[in-house]
Amino acid sequence: MNSEMTDLANMPAWVAMWLLVLAVFFLAKGLTLREVFAFEGGVNGRRLFGYVFLWPGMDARGFCSRDSVPRPRRYEYFAGGAKTLFGVALLWLGVGLIGANHPLLRGWVGMAGVVFLLHFGLFHLLSVAWRTGDVHAPPIMKWPGAATSLSQFWGGSWNAAFTDLVHEHFFKPLARRFGGRTALVASFVLSGALHELIIAVPARGGYGLPTLYFALQAAGLLFERSGVGRRLGLGSGLKGWCFVALTAGAPAFFLFHPIFVLNVILPMLHAIGAN
């Protein structure tokens, strides 16, 4: 174990980050697989391989089921491709348009490019391809920018894969035993710990800031659902959208803090020629 940690520390920080992301990803996949082995008649091996290696979602039961699913709408083919190309443009054109004297801005544009390229773009195209083949694989990004409540934003609009994983395997068991409020807070604490691992650890700094970000999300959700929050109308409409932007958007500087941008993102952008 010590030698593995030493190897991780000696490699480029952005490489270490992606290795940690992959490690967490496949551990999560393994956790979800127990849902499908109870299927009557067994599981299709090709479908199982596709779920583990060719799909970022975490709903193993839905993906491996034999139920028919609606075909994707035509505009989704164009939308997925357009978002992918936009991510490419941000990475290999947008970053270079920003002067080197604005490193944090370059890093944030690069991060936006990665998210559009992968989460909004390629993952959407994967969803379209699987649903065309009659496989339950809904997009993992469901218009998060249009969310009018934190409940909607964190309830599946943003990265539904992570939401499915945490809700099914962490929140629900805890809620049955300790209640919903405790389970909600614990779920965000878990999110903070995982992001510490894949953000603060490879950056070798900024420890505690990802946890602080997700603690703010838990507090915001509890406030939104409180009597005061309901009277203020924070769970819908324009007020709700503004509350999401204020609570989930503005503090993202804590999550993707400057140490991470400077030590991980900028070297990664340089390595892939996005500079």
Image: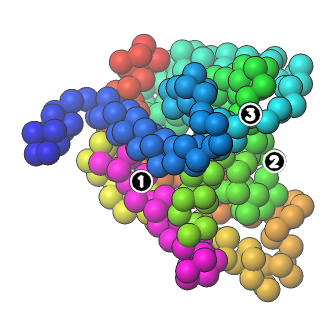
Q: Position of residue 241 (x, y in %)?
A: 80, 58
* Residue holding disc 1: 194
Nearest the camera: 69 or 223? 69
Proximity of marks 3 and 2: CB atoms separated by less than 8 Å: no
* Residue holding disc 2: 146
Q: Position of residue 176 (x, y in %)?
A: 60, 77
| Quadrant containing the N terminus in the rendered view | top left
Residue for point 69% across, 41% down: 62
Q: Give the range drawn in magenta.
A: 174-201
Q: Position of residue 71 (x, y in %)?
A: 86, 25
Q: Is residue 91 magenta?
A: no
**Crowding at mark 1 (Cα within 10 Å: few <14, some 14-19, many 20+):** some
192 over 143 or under it: above or below:
below
Is 57 left, or right, of 72 in this rendering? left
Compute the Cα span from label 3 to label 2: 32 Å
Please, what secondary structure does the residue beneath circle 2 have? helix
| Residue type of the residue flagged with mark 1 | Leu
Report the magenta stretch's main SS: helix
**Crowding at mark 2 (Cα within 10 Å: few <14, some 14-19, many 20+):** few
| Quadrant containing the C terminus in the rendered view | top left
Q: Earlier in the sequence, mark 1 or mark 3?
A: 3
| Residue type of the residue flagged with mark 3 | Arg
Please, what secondary structure does the residue beneath circle 3 have? loop
| Residue type of the residue flagged with mark 2 | Ala
Question: Which numbered disc covers residue 66?
Answer: 3
Q: Which of the two marks, 2 or 1, is nearer to us in this view?
A: 1
Q: Earlier in the sequence, mark 2 or mark 1?
A: 2
Q: Earlier in the sequence, mark 3 or mark 2?
A: 3
